[in-house]
Amino acid sequence: MEQVTAVALMAALPRAAALPHHRDALRALARTSAAPATAALVRAWAATEAGRRDPEVVRAVAEALAADAAVRAPLARALTAWLAELADPGRYPPRPQDVPRRPGTDAATANTIGTGAHVTGPVLQAHGIHGDVHIHPASRSRVAPPPRQLPPVPAHFTNRSAELAALDGHVGTARNASRIVVISGPAGVGKTALARRWLLAHADAFPDGQLYADLRGHADEGPARPNELLGEFLRALGHERPPAELRERAALWRTATAGSRIAVLLDNALSAAQVRPLLPAAHGALTVVTSRGRLTGLGMDGAAFQPLDVLAAEDAVRLLSRRVGADRVHREPDAALKVARACAGLPLAVCVAAARLATRPRQPLAAMAGALGRGAAPALDALRIEGEYAVRGALDASYRQLEPELARCYRCLGLAPVAVLTAQVAAAACRLGPPEDALDVLDELAEVNLLEDLGPDPRTGLGRYRFHDLVRAHAQRLAEAEETAAEAAAAVRRVVDYHLAAATAAEALLSPSHRTLRRDYAEPVAQEPPFADAPGALRWLDAERTQLMAVLRTAEAKGMYAVVWQLADALWPMFLRLRPYDLWIEAHERGLAAARRAGDREGESRMLTSGGTGLRNVGRHDEAIAWFTQALRAARDEAARLTGHPDGGGPALAAAHRAEAQALHGIGQSCRLAGRLAEAAEHFERALALREAVGHRRGTALTRICLGDVALAAGRPDDALEPLARARVDLLAEDDPYDAARALAFIGHCRTLIGGGERAPGEEQLRAALAEFEATGAAHWQGRVLEMLGESAEGRGDTGAALHWYERSLTRYTSAGAPDVDRLTRRIRQLPPPDAAAPRTPPDSS
């Protein structure tokens, strides 16, 4: 089946916009067969006349549909039929009311199938039927469901009927507007539980998904960054490689949510400024924000405000009754009321007190009432400081009932510098044995409401737990009071070292040639990494990116400078494969500063070259050159220092020359991307000489590829063949199939540019390189090779074949999130119309 392309869809959408039948048909098939984000884009395009005319909207819809069709066979078939019908409506059946009927038939049963129809699923065509008919549904590709990220409502949720009705009223008055509701109140008052309860009760109103983010407004490590949260949201909607910059990421978020009926819960927000970039664009979307502050600044965005007060005494007693049993409360009503009042009506405090009581069924309620009342501030005073005293009293009482070892673990977990706890993290923080032992600890603390069980991570399957902010602060205060400074620092360092070791293990699986620098651990890391192979390592890096960056920032704040640059270095495969450019650059900026503070030349050099690569990849070529130039100077200084050494420098001098060559190579690549070909060639030649001198065979081959690329860009394909051919041989010998395929692609491209008798064998080599890239799943380089095949077809005057290859290339670039999309789209638009008599698809293009 011929591939559905973005170019074909961009040409078809303006025509379909004027035909309601075709417009509605596209909206329907996108809803049933496309990703939720794509379906939302199609709805936005179809919703307004202005949207259907907007070229940026049309382009976004076309690219999203083409990318989905590349991996969803039912959608590809449906789009192919839709395009064919749009191009030749005469081949398809007229409307039912226009179909001539034979005698004996009626409009309800008559049907016509034209010769160009595409029919999927079970088909039965019969004049007369005798006996039974059995129809079995054909297997279908599974369509990913819309995200449903809201945590469940606590089973003990009590009352709040007035607040729920008020929320209904806020939203009911703004059905046709972008809706924002801010639920504000003191810590522990139940803002999140209320928001979950209301949103889950209205789940049917948001068929395109419900998203959740903890903005960590009062966490010790600082509030969550909108850029990181947008990345999580976009990946949940199917955008695997969102752009790096906040402005671009926010724009894509607005595009992806345009026309969607989604709900977004932004929990524990600090300020309006933190919330604003996360607001979806759709009129049918609802954003609920919870915050200890009132966030009045969101009134400018049309927000409604719902303050939340503490529970009335009778509701607090009812909540206690649900947790410990109605019979128990009925036997001691006065003591139950004292417990509720001592907890200042805060649901969090009541739940913590009830958890202790529930585990001690013989303990009188009066004992808890007395424990909470001893020396505690009056309830109103506690409420004035956001309920901290009331919660502290309840937490203290609960903590005193923990077994000593569990109490120690509670304190250590409060020190962990991450928001989400896994069994591996808990084992490190508490110096426990295998993760199973740590899991028991986490479960016990969750059982008494000191931790919240978040369930398994959908990517890694690892169980996840977290502290409420106030509970975590309580655990930290206890750790400060009961642990020595050295013990507390050691607990933090064990968690940091665990993440460094696990990231290093992922690096060894995913980028073994990069795994060369040392790692400094305070003590041997006992925990095994939570993955066994390269795919599992990449999933772990993806799931833990926020935690890993929190650990890196903590290490910097606590002066663990070697760990900072080593962790940034270990995260190389995450940066290279997943391309979170914002984190890539931040990690290397912090890593560079840390390496310099530590006086570590190796770390500084690696941070400069790896960080320069990130800067170069986002188009900041001048900054990248500046970083590589600093690395070059440092390497030359080190080489000069070692040159006069009595033993001749030995391996250290060779390492300095390799670092010098790496910096020269990086400058050359940055100059090449900036279009400064003469400078690029000069730096590549110098890098080549150094790499040959130190016997770095793989590095030499990579530089030869770059020299061949520069010669091609300068219009000298004959000069490019020799270095590319040598690079291909050396890379195969070094067992580097990916870069060997790059060399083969450039060789084939050279021969097609030379033309004549070289063109046909060159195209064969391009097809061979394409197959090698398809075997490794390298989508971006598949796009490069397909574009080279298109250039060859265009060079021999076959515009139809060129368009075919370019459209396939565009699909690969789109799926990889490559910046080449705009350039290739412009190139396709500039193609002359293909000869109608020429075949559209090359006969050997399979």
Image: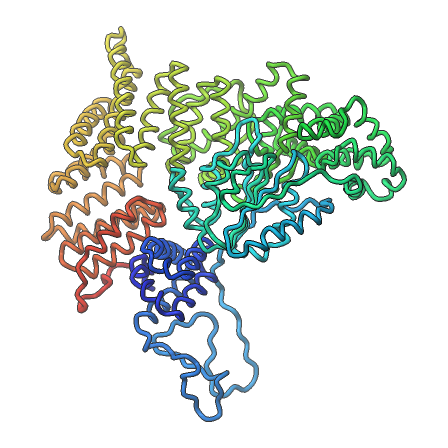
Assign the N terminus to one quadrant of the image: bottom left
Which quadrant holds residue 339? top right
Residue 39 pos. (x, y %): 45, 57
The answer to whether residue 767 is visible is no
Q: Nearer the viewer, residue 442 or 356?
A: 356
Query: Is residue 590 positioned above or below 712 on the image?
Result: above
Query: Is residue 660 positioned above or below 111 on the image?
Result: above
Q: Residue at x 58, y 37 (%)?
A: 294
Assign the C terminus to one quadrant of the image: bottom left
How many marks on residues? 0
Query: Is residue 126 positioned above or below 590 on the image?
Result: below
The answer to whether residue 756 is visible is yes
* Residue, far right: 331
Q: Residue at x 46, y 70 (%)?
A: 121
Residue 621 pos. (x, y %): 26, 32
**267 sits left or right of 717 in the view:** right
**394 sits left or right of 56 in the view:** right
Residue 167 pos. (x, y %): 63, 49
Residue 197 pos. (x, y %): 65, 48
Q: Nearer the viewer, residue 116 or 703?
A: 116
